[in-house]
Image (spheres, rainbow, N blue to C red):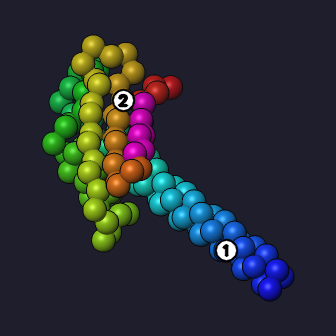
Amino acid sequence: MKNFIITTGAVILILTIMSYQFQCNQMLREKQQLKYAADEAAATAGLCFDEDHFGEGRLLFDRKKATRKAEQVISYNLQNSQFIWKISFADQGQQRPFVTIIIEKDRLKVLSKYEYLPY
């Protein structure tokens, strides 16, 4: 009887550890997927400059086009998912304009920043 109790306790302990490991791996994969989608959306939105201002030598984003393109990339990469995303632009008075995208899903929150670097 003593061996049965010890074996049962060991099995319960192993199952608990395996359950936590599975949840951790699942959360890690989901976070990597969110980060990939945020990086791709930020890079795509960061390429949408206003052509008129770009011709004058000023780097300003075309916010409507950039938001639309970022939304397309995020919805393509995160199909069948419930999430909240935000986009912010910093181009006015900045030497290096950048786009920031935040995606929140359940308890996960990822942030991606794409900065324009002139060569």
Q: Looking at the image, which residue is at 59% across and 69% down?
A: 19
Q: Which residues are magenta?
A: 109-115
Q: Looking at the image, which residue is at 63% across and 64% down?
A: 21
8 with respect to 43 (left or right): right
Q: x and y percent of residue 44 in the render?
A: 35, 47
Q: x and y percent of residue 38 in the render?
A: 40, 48
Instruction: Read off the residue under disc 2.
Output: 98
Q: Main secondary structure of the magenta part?
A: strand
Q: Looking at the image, which residue is at 35% across and 25% down?
A: 97
Q: Residues within 10 Å of mark 2 (few under 14, many from 20)?
A: many
Instruction: Read off the residue under disc 1.
Output: 12
63 with respect to 73 (left or right): left
Magenta-drawn stretch contains 111: yes
Label 1 element class: helix
Residue 95 in view in this figure: yes
51 or 15: nearer the eye?
15
Magenta-drawn stretch contains 29: no
Label 2 element class: strand
Quadrant location, the N terminus: bottom right
